[in-house]
Amino acid sequence: MPSSDRVLKELGENIKLARLRRKLSAEQVAERANISRGTLGQLEKGAPSVAMGMYCQVLFVLGLEKDLLKVAADDVLGRKLQDAEMMVKERASKKKSA
């Protein structure tokens, strides 16, 4: 999916920039996250084959693990859909004839 590929690529780039701002080498971050240098490289490129747990480990090393809590926190569309469901009145049940 092209759009998800773009999102993963941007996420990887953001993680790489965060690492560079902290003046940490790829080797340091990989070692602290207990992943290989190659996996970190793939993660920073946004490879979809990298497990979500690896992203969590790297974000933790960078002190950014709380950023994951922001995912879907402000779910505008979901709230609108939920509100729309609440507005729909349920039909009364049919009474059975005796």
Image (cartoon, rainbow, N blue to C red):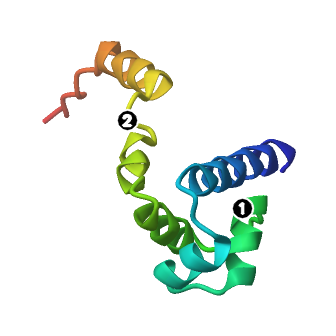
The local secondary structure at tag 1 comes to helix
18 or 79, which lies in front?
Answer: 18
The local secondary structure at tag 2 comes to loop
Q: Position of residue 64 (x, y in %)?
A: 42, 53
Q: What residue sits 47% from the left and 66% below the top?
A: 56
- Residue indicated by mark 2: 73
Please say whether residue 49 is visible from this viewpoint: no
Residue farthest to the front, as pictured: 23
Image quadrant in which you'd find residue 42? bottom right
Q: Is residue 98 above or below residue 5?
A: above
Q: What residue sits 72% from the left and 61% below the top?
A: 44
Q: Amino acid at mark 1?
A: Glu
Q: Is residue 54 above or below residue 84?
A: below
Residue farthest to the right, as pictured: 2
Please say whether residue 21 is visible from this viewpoint: yes
- Residue indicated by mark 1: 44
Check if mark 1's residue and mark 2's residue have beta carbons within 8 Å.
no
